[in-house]
Amino acid sequence: MYRKSLPENNGMLFVFDRPARSCMWMKNTAIPLSVAFIDHEGVIVNIEEMEPFTTDSHCSAGWIRYALEMNAGWFRKNGLKPGSRVEGLHK
């Protein structure tokens, strides 16, 4: 929240204590972001595009352990999609 910029190839990783269904919103965020919802094995469950200053809920399509927010379109530009594996996450 309250983000006005995000450096290229930098993101915000949210780590949840245990797998759960989770939602994000953009109420006080001034930049468009993409969020990847990632399960406990590091597999992307779904990716959502989020517009600035909205209160729309963007929810995981399944049980997740992580949510990774990046600049809008970052996952698409880097060839990542649901089913892709993210390495380096603490399991």
Image (spheres, rainbow, N blue to C red):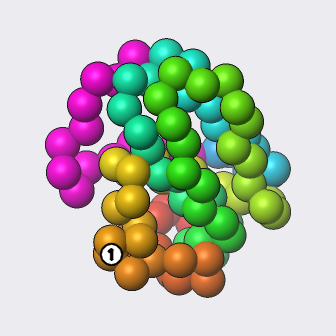
Percent coordinates x, y for residue 50 in the rendering: 54, 42
Looking at the picture, tell me which residue is in the foreground, 41 or 57. Answer: 57
Residue 13 seen in render? no
Residue 7 shown in magenta = yes
Q: Main secondary structure of the magenta part?
A: loop
Percent coordinates x, y for residue 27 in the rendering: 57, 19
Percent coordinates x, y for residue 79 in the rendering: 39, 81
The residue drawn where x is 46% and y is 65% is 89
| Residue at the left extreme of this rendering | 7
Residue 75 shown in magenta = no
Residue at the spot of label 1: 78
Is residue 52 toward the left or the right of residue 58 in the image? left
Is residue 26 toward the left or the right of residue 57 in the image? left
Q: With respect to residue 37, does 75 lie above or below?
A: below
Q: Secondary structure at mark 1?
A: loop
Q: Which residues are magenta?
A: 1-15
Looking at the picture, tell me which residue is in the foreground, 21 or 6. Answer: 6
Q: With respect to residue 45, does 85 lie above or below?
A: below
The amino acid sitting under disc 1 is Asn
Residue 23 seen in render? yes
The residue drawn where x is 67% and y is 24% is 55
Is residue 71 toward the left or the right of residue 55 in the image? left
Percent coordinates x, y for residue 32 in the rendering: 41, 39
Looking at the picture, tell me which residue is in the foreground, 66 or 18. Answer: 66
Q: How many marks?
A: 1
